[in-house]
Amino acid sequence: MDQDTADIRRVIEGDTSAFENIVRRWQRPLINLAYRFCRNQQIAEEMAQDAFLQIYRKLDKFSGGASFSTWIFAVSLNLYRSSMRRKSLPVEPIDTLKQIAGEQFPHLKFEQEEREELVRRAVSALPQRYRDAIIVFYFRDMDLKETASILNVSEGTVKAWLHRGRELLRSKLGSRISPPEAIKEVCV
């Protein structure tokens, strides 16, 4: 029995202090995932805290059919999506990114930091389903099966969304940046 399963059982049996172990293990990954949505550390921490509250409330619903990590990422992802819709933070229109890249860096190689920011902005401007698929698959380094489970869609749908998301990024970022490699280079 792994640590998560043992702690889940203890919490369900009434030992609420066991949830602290779950929070310690999963706090950083959930904050990192939230940060991908909002690009603000304080807001990401608040979003992760909300996710832990939701996870705690729904812990008895965890069936063990999927891994615990898949389940908590799915719960968190749904909460983060809802949170971002409510807050509606300003997002840079993706159509302007190619123009920005062309005007600011016409003959220069992208500096790593500038390149990462451009990719982050491009990913955040994608339609939600493509953005979510790319964030979970590339930034959280999940495989197709885990990504499909988190997004609650088939693996074929994830493949299609990833393909379409990469195509949109390629068309908007131009030939200087190859989306899969650029996405992988962006630091967590």
Image (tube, grey):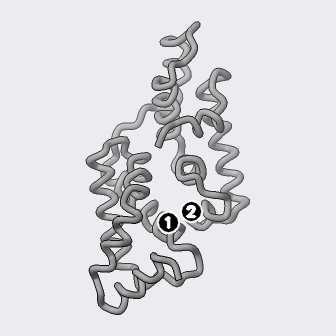
- Give the mark nearer the N terminus: 2 vs 1: 1
The picture places residue 107, in percent across and down from the top left corner, at: 58, 7
Q: Please tell me whether residue 100 is drawn above or below residue 37 in the rendered image.
A: above
Q: CA distance from mark 2 to mark 1?
A: 6 Å
Mark number displayed over residue 36: none
- Binning the other alpha carbons within 10 Å of mark 1 as few (below 14), some (14 to 19) or many (20 upward) gives many
Q: Secondary structure at mark 1?
A: helix
Q: Residue at the location (51% across, 19% down)?
A: 111
Q: Are marks 2 and 1 in contact (CB under 8 Å)?
A: yes
Left or right of 4 on screen, residue 152: right
The picture places residue 67, in percent across and down from the top left corner, at: 56, 73
**Can the viewer see residue 98?**
yes
The one nearer the camera, 128 or 39, is 39
Residue at the far bottom: name it: 13
Mark number displayed over residue 74: 1
The one nearer the camera, 91 or 42, is 42
**Can the viewer see residue 81?**
no
- Binning the other alpha carbons within 10 Å of mark 2 as few (below 14), some (14 to 19) or many (20 upward) gives many
**Mark 2 sits on what residue?**
151
Q: Amino acid at mark 1?
A: Ala
Q: Amino acid at mark 2?
A: Leu
The picture places residue 147, in percent across and down from the top left corner, at: 60, 60
